[in-house]
């Protein structure tokens, strides 16, 4: 388990091979999902949980001015994303 800190306006690419087993929880701020076609997706707030497997999400973006935090949980034996 690790925590990803997204500074204001930051964007982190989601590489499917690294993130496919990741279960994520927004623990601070808000995170916007960037969809496969580059369009903005839903904005998820505090305590929102989401899987990335099979979603086609290509990036996580912080739309706010404060740092957002996302807890990344991976099953035993899986490699945590290197974002």
Image: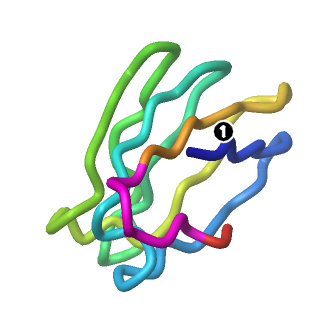
- Does 83 sit left or right of 41 as displayed? right
> For the stretch drawn in magenta, what is the main secondary structure?
loop
- Does 43 sit left or right of 69 as displayed? left
Where residue 68 appears, as percent x and y from the top left, is: 71, 31
Where residue 53 appears, as percent x and y from the top left, is: 21, 63
Question: Please, which residue is most extreme toward the left here?
Answer: 54
What crowding class fits label 1: few (fewer than 14 Cα within 10 Å), some (14-19), or many (20 or more)? many
Residue interval drawn in magenta: 74-81
**Element marked by disc 1:** loop
Question: Please, which residue is most extreme toward the front here?
Answer: 77
Check the picture and name the quadrant holding the C terminus: bottom right
- Does 21 sit left or right of 59 as displayed? left
Q: Is residue 80 magenta?
A: yes
Q: Which residue is mark 1?
A: 63
- Count of numbered marks: 1
Splitting the image into 4 quarters, where does residue 82 fall?
bottom right
Q: Is residue 54 magenta?
A: no
């Amino acid at each position: 388990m690790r925590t990803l800190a997204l500074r204001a306006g930051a964007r982190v690419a989601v590489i499917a091979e690294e993130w496919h087993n990741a279960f994520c929880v927004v623990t601070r701020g808000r995170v916007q999902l960037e969809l496969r076609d580059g369009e903005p997706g839903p904005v998820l707030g505090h305590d929102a949980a989401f899987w990335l497997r099979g979603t086609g999400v290509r990036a996580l973006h912080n739309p706010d001015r404060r740092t957002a935090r996302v807890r990344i949980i991976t099953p035993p034996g899986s490699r945590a994303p290197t974002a």
